[in-house]
Image (spheres, grey):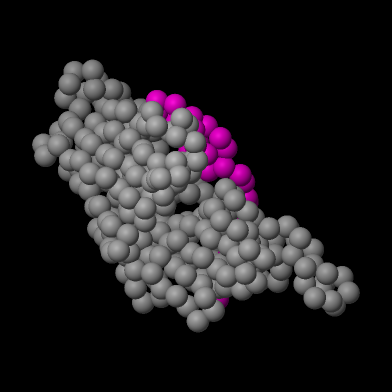
Amino acid sequence: MSIRAVKNTKQAIPTMEGAGVKLHRAFGFNDTSDTDPFLLFDDFRNDNPADYEAGFPWHPHRGIETITYVLAGQATHQDSLGNSGTLGAGDVQWMTAGSGIMHQEMPKGDKDGRMHGFQLWANLPRSLKMTTPRYQDVEAKEIPEIVDDDGTIARVIVGDFWGKSGPVDGIAAKPQYLDISVPAGVKKTIKIDAYRNVFAYVFEGEGAFVDASKPVGILTEKELNGEEIQIRDLSGNRTLIYFDTGDEIVVQAGERGVRFLLISGKPLKEPVAWHGPIVMNTREELKQAVDDLQKGTFIKHGS
């Protein structure tokens, strides 16, 4: 077994999207080499309705998949193909935009005004850029939740983990999307296929992600004088962790435990051309998408 060392850590950056929604962006609209096949990751947790109620009015998508995971509140969606629905706490939507849709998402807080959740964009390979759009709406009760002997809890949204399979299927990048909670003081090893790019995103508690001998970037008391290890630098709320190569990661939970998303996928290794929520392989394909929008021919497949 080879433990993946931490390549880099960073804090999600406050930004604004849609009609004025305040959120934190962990990555997006830049180099995708560390996250391929994933393009963007937003954390839209907010406790002030004024900061999110304007939502994300009608906008186009082509060439990507969007994955929305709601923790609190609701997200109501509607599109140009006639699809609509509402995601509640614990629910997931995996939307394959494919050849193109017009789409809107409008958040609503819970009884305490909270709207918490995440959105991930996954790239589509060249061969599927213009595929027929589709949705996979998954209710919280459909997502397997596994409790290990040490109290670690894993919700398996996509992929196989600890003998369970997530309910979302048929995804080209063969991703794995896990919501993992590790209790206070527990050191946990999690296997990851070596061919995948993988990142973790901490959103509750704190923990140290460990290489083969020690927490990365942390000097321990044991190394100095043989006494008990004291972890003095932990990854906490809204920390993104990029990993190097290997087939497992190790996390040491802090005094409050740690909860994080662990997301991995098979790299597509294809050119990426951006135009907001439209992602193709070439500038020429982007120009065609913009022309389609202007001519009213953007929607290629009906409901």
Instruction: Name the quarter where the N terminus is drawn.
Output: bottom right
* The one of 63 and 71 positioned closer to us in this rendering: 71
Q: How many marks?
A: 0
Which region of the structure is painted magenta?
A: 1-30
Quarter of the image for residue 288 reads top left
Instruction: Name the quarter where the C terminus is drawn.
Output: top left
- Residue furthest to the right: 225
Task: Tell me if residue 149 comes above or below residue 75 in the rendering.
Answer: below
* The one of 143 and 270 positioned closer to us in this rendering: 143
Q: Residue at x 37, y 53 (%)?
A: 89
Residue 153 seen: yes
Q: Residue at x 55, y 68 (%)?
A: 182
Whether the magenta-drawn stretch holds residue 12 is answered as: yes
Q: Residue 122: x, y in percent?
A: 37, 46
- Residue furthest to the top: 294
Q: Is residue 266 left or right of residue 45?
A: left
Whether the magenta-drawn stretch holds residue 89 is answered as: no
Q: Residue 109: x, y in percent?
A: 40, 41
Task: Tell me if residue 53 comes above or below residue 133 in the rendering.
Answer: above
- Residue furthest to the front: 111
